[in-house]
Image: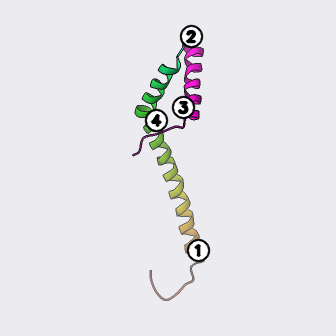
């Protein structure tokens, strides 16, 4: 799996959100430098769990849609004397 990477603008937004969360919930200031390190930690150690859950959910949706498509194909199949 490739590393999760963000653009500079995305990093800036994410660090800002982390800083606001720390300020609002812990009454603690999180500087830009510390925020970037914290974001790197989350991206490396925690984000893969969310990423994999997203893939799992996407796979489940795809499989259910594929099952519906397969059923639709069987519905329009013409009868013949051949057995599948």
Marks 4 and 1: CB-CB under 8 Å?
Answer: no
Q: Label 3 neighbourhood size at 10 Å, few (<14), some (14-19), many (20+)?
A: some
Q: Earlier in the sequence, mark 2 or mark 4?
A: 2
Residue drawn 40% across the image and 32% down it: 45
Prevailing secondary structure of the magenta residues: helix
For the residues labelled 2 and 1, say whether their Cβ atoms are less than 8 Å apart.
no
Which percent across, then down, holds residue 24?
Answer: 60, 15
Q: CA distance from mark 2 to mark 1?
A: 62 Å
In the picture, the disc for residue 47 is 4
- Quarter assignment of residue 69: bottom right
Between the residue at mark 3 and the residue at mark 2, the CA separation in whole angstroms equals 22 Å
Q: Is residue 9 above or below residue 54?
A: above
Pointer 4 or 1: first along the chain: 4
* CA separation in Å, label 4 and label 1: 42 Å
User: Start and end of the magenta stretch?
Assistant: 1-26
Q: Earlier in the sequence, mark 1 or mark 3?
A: 3
Q: Note whether 70 is above or below 58 in the view shown.
A: below
Residue 74 location (% of width, % of height): 55, 74
Badge 4: residue crowd in 10 Å (few <14, some 14–19, many ≥20): some
Q: Position of residue 26 (x, y in %)?
A: 54, 13
**Residue 27 — which label?**
2
- Please name whichever residue, 52 or 39, is drawn nearer the observer in this view of the structure: 39
Residue at x-position 55% and y-position 23% = 18
4 vs 1, front mark: 4
Say few, some or many: other residues with alpha carbon within 10 Å of mark 1 (under 14 / 14 to 19 / 20 or more): few
The residue that disc 1 covers is: 75
Q: Return the residue at label 3.
A: 11
The reply to whether discs 3 and 4 touch (Cβ–Cβ < 8 Å) is no
């Amino acid at each position: 799996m490739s590393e999760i990477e963000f653009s500079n603008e995305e990093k800036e937004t994410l660090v800002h959100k982390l800083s606001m969360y720390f300020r609002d919930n812990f009454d603690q200031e999180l500087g830009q430098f510390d925020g970037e390190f914290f974001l790197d930690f989350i991206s490396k150690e925690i984000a893969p769990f969310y990423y994999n859950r997203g893939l799992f959910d996407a796979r489940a949706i795809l499989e259910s849609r594929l099952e519906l498509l397969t059923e639709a194909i069987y519905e329009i199949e013409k009868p013949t004397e051949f057995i599948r």
